[in-house]
């Protein structure tokens, strides 16, 4: 937690309400005070950085999670990203998906896609719109 607060100070994020919102989101994510998974946390809050459409926000969240810039996302990673966005949305009182809906969205995206290597990953470029246009989203 202290590292997160220091990072916000180093980034000069001290303007209210930005600081308060990010601190409260971190607290929500750090339920057991064991810290948070950094990638998942940043993917979950990344839609807050944009006022663009759902497609752009999803693309940005996946890009943040794909810090190695492979252009690929696995089924498990995509579930984590969507769950993270869902978690952040719940903080603001937005309508959220139930876990089964997230799995259905990911399954629908992966159905018929060519998997890469042995890790059940697909190229996500050009496929994010399929998530954004899913009936559950």
Image (cartoon, grey):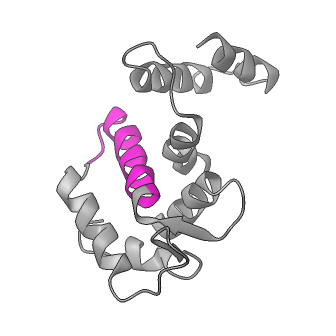
Quadrant in the picture for the N terminus: top right
Q: In which quarter of the image is residue 56?
A: bottom right
- SS assignment for the magenta stretch, majority: helix
Residue at 37% over, 19% down: 31
Residue at 31% over, 38% down: 90
Q: Is residue 135 magenta?
A: no
Q: Is residue 100 above or below residue 13?
A: below
Residue at 32% over, 83% down: 111
Inspect this view and state whether residue 133 appears.
no
Q: In x, y percent, where is residue 19?
A: 61, 21
Q: How many labels does the image show?
A: 0
Per the rendered image, the range of residues in magenta is: 77-95
Most extreme residue toward the front is 118
Q: In x, y percent, where is residue 67?
A: 69, 53
Residue at 61% over, 47% down: 49
Q: In x, y percent, where is residue 44?
A: 48, 44
Inspect this view and state whether residue 34 appears.
yes
């Amino acid at each position: 937690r202290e590292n997160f607060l220091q990072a916000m100070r180093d980034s000069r994020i001290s303007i209210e309400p930005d600081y308060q919102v990010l601190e409260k989101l971190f607290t929500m994510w750090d339920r057991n005070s064991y810290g948070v998974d950094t990638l998942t946390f940043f993917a979950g809050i990344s839609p807050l950085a944009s006022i663009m459409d759902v497609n752009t926000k999803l693309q940005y969240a996946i890009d943040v999670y794909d810090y190695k810039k492979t252009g690929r996302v696995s089924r498990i990673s995509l579930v984590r990203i969507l769950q993270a966005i869902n978690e952040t949305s719940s903080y603001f009182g937005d309508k959220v998906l139930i876990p089964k809906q997230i799995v259905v969205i990911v399954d629908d995206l992966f159905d018929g896609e060519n998997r890469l290597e042995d890790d059940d990953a697909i190229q996500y470029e050009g496929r994010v719109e399929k998530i954004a246009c899913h009936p559950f989203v």
